Amino acid sequence: MITVVALLFLPIILTMSLYRLYQLPRDILGRKKWFNPDHRVIAMLASGTTYIELGFYTVSILAGLFGALKHVPKTFDEIIAAGSVLMVYPFIYLIYEWVYHYMLDPRPTNH
């Protein structure tokens, strides 16, 4: 049952992840966001770690989807191996959003 729910949400979470992976460097380099000055080192480490982790899992999901197009899983073990990555992916995205929200602040505007 949970695997079915994960499969239903996969396109939405994958699209949001690809957008975040594209948008975060643009926000930082475009000076729209900056690391929280109260705990800058922790914010940089947490943001970098979760960015790399989300990127790794996104590439894993995409590789798994393309691999499934070429080689359809036939045994129960192959299905479980593919489903284990799918089960973790929403939690990885949730952690990334939490870090993005709490460790990055909008840059103050000078009026």
Image (tube, rainbow, N blue to C red):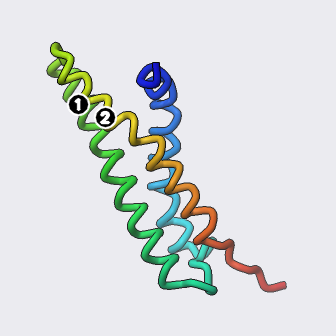
- In the rendered view, does 24 fall on the left or right side of 106? left
Name which residue lies at 51% across and 62% down.
24
Q: Position of residue 58 (x, y in %)?
A: 35, 45
Q: Position of residue 27 (x, y in %)?
A: 56, 67
Q: CA distance from mark 2 to mark 1?
A: 5 Å
Mark 1 highlights which residue?
81
Q: Position of residue 63 (x, y in %)?
A: 24, 37
- In the rendered view, does 81 fall on the left or right side of 7? left
Could you tell me which secondary element the residue under label 1 belongs to?
Answer: helix
Q: Position of residue 98 (x, y in %)?
A: 58, 58
Q: Nearer the viewer, residue 51 or 92?
A: 92
Could you tell me which secondary element the residue under label 2 belongs to?
Answer: helix
Q: Residues within 10 Å of mark 1 (few under 14, many from 20)?
A: few
Give the residue type that dot 1 points to.
Ala
Q: Quadrant of residue 48?
A: bottom left
- In the rendered view, does 9 fall on the left or right side of 80? right
Residue 111, numbered circle: none
Q: Quadrant of residue 53?
A: bottom left
State which quarter of the image contains the C terminus.
Answer: bottom right
Q: Nearer the viewer, residue 49 or 69?
A: 49
Mark 2 highlights which residue?
84
Q: Nearer the viewer, residue 10 or 2?
A: 2
Give the residue type that dot 2 points to.
Ser
- In the rendered view, does 22 fall on the left or right side of 64? right
Name which residue lies at 54% across and 84% down.
40
Name which residue lies at 52% across and 76% down.
43
Q: Are marks 2 and 1 in contact (CB under 8 Å)?
A: yes
* Vertical side of 106 occupied by 80: above or below: above
* Vertical side of 50 occupied by 3: above or below: above
Name which residue lies at 26% across and 26% down.
80
